Image (cartoon, helix red, strand yellow):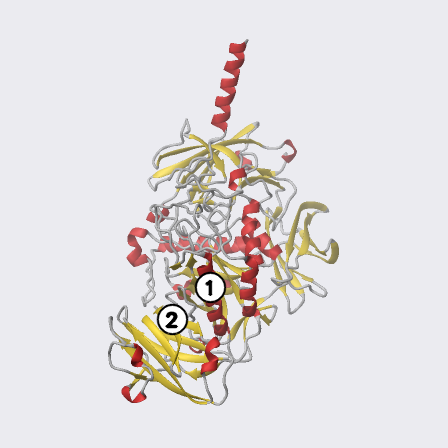
Amino acid sequence: MKKCLSLIVVVWVSSAMMQAPTLGQGLNPVGMKTAWGEKITPENAWRQYPRPQMVRESWKNLNGLWDYAILPKESVAPKTFDGKILVPFCAESSLSGVGKMVKPDQNLWYNTTFDVPADWKGKNVLLHFDAVDWQTTVWLNGKKVGLHKGGSDPFTFDITPFLKKGTQELVLSVWDPTDTGTQSRGKQVLEPKGIWYTPVTGIWQTVWLEPVAKTHIASIIPVPDVDKGTVTINSVLRGATGKENLVVKVLKDNKVVAERTGSAGKPLEVSVPGADLWTPYHPSLYQLEVTLTGANATLDNVKSYFAMRKISLAKDAFGFQRLMLNNEILFQYGTLDQGWWPDGLLTPPSDAAMRYDMDVLKDMGFNMLRKHIKVEPSRYYYYADSLGLLVWQDMASGFNTAEREVQHVKAQSVEDWKRPRESAQQFEQEWRSIMDHLRFFPSIVVWVVFNEGWGQYETKRVVEWTQQYDATRIVDGVSGWADRGAGHLNDAHQYPGPAMEPAELNPGRAIVLGEFGGLGLPVEDHIWNPQMRNWGYRTYQSREQLITEYATLMHNLFPMIHRGLAAAVYTQTTDVEGEVNGLMTYDRKVVKIDPALLRMLHKSLFTAPSKPLTIVRDSEVTPQPLRISANETFTASSAPFKESSFTSVQAPVAVAKGDNRQATVSFQLTEIPANLQLRILAHGDAKVYLNGKLVLNKFIQTKRHYDEVSLGEYCGYLRKGKNQLVVELSKVASNSQFDFGLYTF
């Protein structure tokens, strides 16, 4: 009997080991996990209802353990499998239990079974994939259901014709070229380093089933009109005859505040009396109950929601284009949020983990985030709506790494990439699909089409199409680098910065700083891979240094708002693999700067802008006179500065590597300003003197934009009447240009 029991135990343990993969480190160099990842099991992995924008009561979650196999690309469906994979985590992630890289000459195969609930009889059954990277072919019960290309957009198949009695067998084949193709892939590469990360192959968001009537609601898009006090409900139907009606109820605090019936499939405008407007500080949401009726019968019921909010551009009292929320100026400040996780990669380990990042950002005093070349699960945007976080949504860019010199458009390039027609069609099809999927969410206020020239092509056409396709939002055509004058924003990137494009050269567009900062702090025992380069755009070794430098950035950023800066994006929310420039570590276990301190540092950014005043005009827009010295070595005795030793030239001045130059400007003041801002274009060691007093001693490395430095604490060195500003540039690090200006507000 003991022998028999032992055999039963061995069989049971072996079976259990086959059913549940070990959530090991795989491609995770030190097995780094988040607190949420440590608690993930096949039974609790992403069990939440996945589509909060359109809720039906009946559904079935297919997340859990599936069979998988990694085979050569030309192979047919396998008879045996390599083991178990935990869906919805990708094969490369440790949480999947696989932790293996799938190469471009391989396919990732999936196999699972499911039963259709008996009470779904007579319904059509929809199979939803919220995201699979990249090309997915689906079979059900041995018959091909369909194919989808795209790594970020959800897709759905009506599998009703393929169902049989009893248990259903679902098979997937996924191919992902990663960075050997031109498809949209974000930051994924086969050889991760620097700003490029571990690849993601296969299912990486929830897979689920849903029963619907033959005639049903496929989507709902509420479009608020704050000025009119109305919301228009746009609906898309499937299986409609044209005789159906849509009954819409608007609720606030569980009380019906408006109701309207109209023809289904056509825009239905509903008045919202005394509209409660949505803002980051008051994220008010209305609930929707939508019923589809026909022939005196109810065909479909869904629950949804919306917000009364308006995003627009308008000039302020000083002529600068500003980002407006509900017709009021709102400076938008947030982080570059890449949404990567050490244990799940693109997939957050859990719903709670995903929300944690947003809660922390909100606590830190940010009112916005830029979702950087990634599309999150629908629940993410619902939480942003609920918490009051504005979202700038990027398209996931991509280019073939081997063809980088052609497909990655440089900042100085005058021409875009001549993208092949098929590749362009795929990009635009996926971009449209992403916009269709996400345009529901009121927190999304900006679409970002291209990032830093990655796969940038036909910019004017693609950006103008985006503006026309969704006229209710702001479009940032090109974030950083190769601006083509298209879109609502002119978006500079400068590390560490801050910097901005001149508002004078951008009539009709708002000026934003789409990336800056990147201040790094490696935290011991919270590093993805100690053997690789762990870096920030500036890297420090103590929290005290990090805090000081971040505070300096905020000090320098604030005056720029008064010269027209409408928004800024700090890099970044968390560390990601080798990047240690996050406000949190990659595992989210360490917050590097106290949120209360950050709230205090950010508070002034949201005050009303005032009129800027020029003291010494720089030459970014129009060349200005500058008195400059011959190339010489400086000593401590260089001051006081005699203007007779300077030659008058037009700025900006070309300087050569190794040069040492002094430049001076005299200016008159009738009143002593309360604020002072230096703008400087240089690449070398800079010392700045006000009336002979040293006010700045810093290495400056500007590339495409003038660096901004606040000198407000030195206003006491100024005097009424004549003043002298001297900039001493030594050890010029490259052939570059030299210029500066002085401003107040």
The extreme right residue here reads 255
Secondary structure under tag 2 reads loop
| Residue 621, horizontal then vertical, whole percent | 38, 79
| Residue 358, horizontal then vertical, whole percent | 55, 54
Apparent side of residue 81 relative to residue 732 in the rendered image (left or right): right
Q: Is residue 620 visible?
A: no
The residue shown at (48%, 81%) is 716
Q: Amino acid at mark 2?
A: His
Q: Amino acid at mark 1?
A: Thr
Camera-side residue of 516 and 386: 516
**Do the residues bearing badges 1 and 2 touch, measured as CB atoms within 8 Å?**
no
The residue shown at (38%, 87%) is 666
Apparent side of residue 655 relative to residue 324 in the rendered image (left or right): left
| Residue 280, horizontal then vertical, whole percent | 60, 62
Question: Vertical placement of 106 versus 354: above or below?
Answer: above
Label 1: which residue? Answer: 548
Camera-side residue of 267 and 632: 632
| Mark 2: few/some/many CA within 10 Å (<14, 14-19, 20+) | many
**Mark 1–mark 2 distance (CA, rounded to whole Å):** 23 Å
Question: In which quadrant of the rendered image does the N terminus lie?
Answer: top right
Q: Please tell me the numbered disc located at residue 705.
A: 2
Q: Quadrant of residue 363?
A: bottom right
